[in-house]
Image: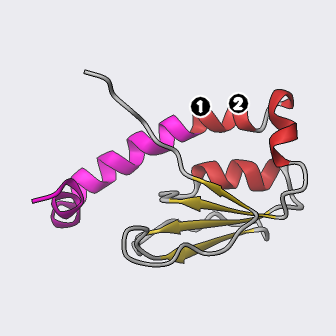
Amino acid sequence: MSFWDAMAREPSLMQTFYGAMSGDSKLVARVLVSDCCKELFRGVGSLVDVGGGTGTMAAAIARAYPDINCTVFELPQDQEAIIGLPNLQFVGGNMFQENIPHGDALLLKVNSINS
């Protein structure tokens, strides 16, 4: 059984995973929206956060850059809507099986562990 299959079968595992990823995203988002990274977003009109979970990262970018239309592409699930952000939307889908929505920029946060 894959990690993703196990998460699908065990809601508490999924909740723990998304909580951890959201916490990590908050830290990374602080750097991405800081003054030192403004150049990264120059000329970007749309951004797709691939596997963006609950939208923590995309919401931070949408708040900091209201001219960028942000999309979170994530497995369909019950997500709390982030309200008050007209430039943020959620699209349900599986990045391993479906086409990723079009965007000027794609964001895919990857954690690597070297053993």
Q: Name the amino acid type tagged 2.
A: Val
- Taking the magenta stretch, the answer to whether it contains residue 10 is yes
- Image coords of residue 48 (percent x, y): 64, 63
* Quarter holding residue 98: bottom left
Picture residue at 52% right of the left edge, 45% below the top = 109
Residue 45 falls left or right of residue 51:
right
Residue position for label 1: 27
Badge 1 marks a residue whose secondary structure is helix
Query: Which residue, as the protein is rendered here, is positioned at the far left?
Result: 1
Which quadrant holds the C terminus?
Answer: top left
Residue 15 falls left or right of residue 61:
left
Task: Give above or below for 56 relative to 5.
Answer: above
Q: Name the amino acid type tagged 1.
A: Leu
Local crowd size for mark 2, using a 10 Å CA cut-off: few (<14), some (14–19), many (≥20): few
- Taking the magenta stretch, the answer to whether it contains residue 56 is no
- Image coords of residue 103 (percent x, y): 71, 68
CB atoms of marks 1 and 2 within 8 Å: yes
* Quarter holding residue 93: bottom left
Which quadrant holds the N terminus?
Answer: bottom left
Badge 2 marks a residue whose secondary structure is helix
Please give the range of residues in magenta.
Answer: 1-25
- Image coords of residue 49 (percent x, y): 60, 58
Local crowd size for mark 1, using a 10 Å CA cut-off: few (<14), some (14–19), many (≥20): few
Residue position for label 2: 31
Dominant secondary structure, magenta: helix
Work out how far the residue at label 1 is from the one at label 2, CA to CA, in angstroms: 7 Å
Task: Give above or below for 79 relative to 13.
Answer: below
- Image coords of residue 97 (percent x, y): 37, 75
Residue 16 falls left or right of residue 109:
left
Task: Give above or below for 63 relative to 38.
Answer: below
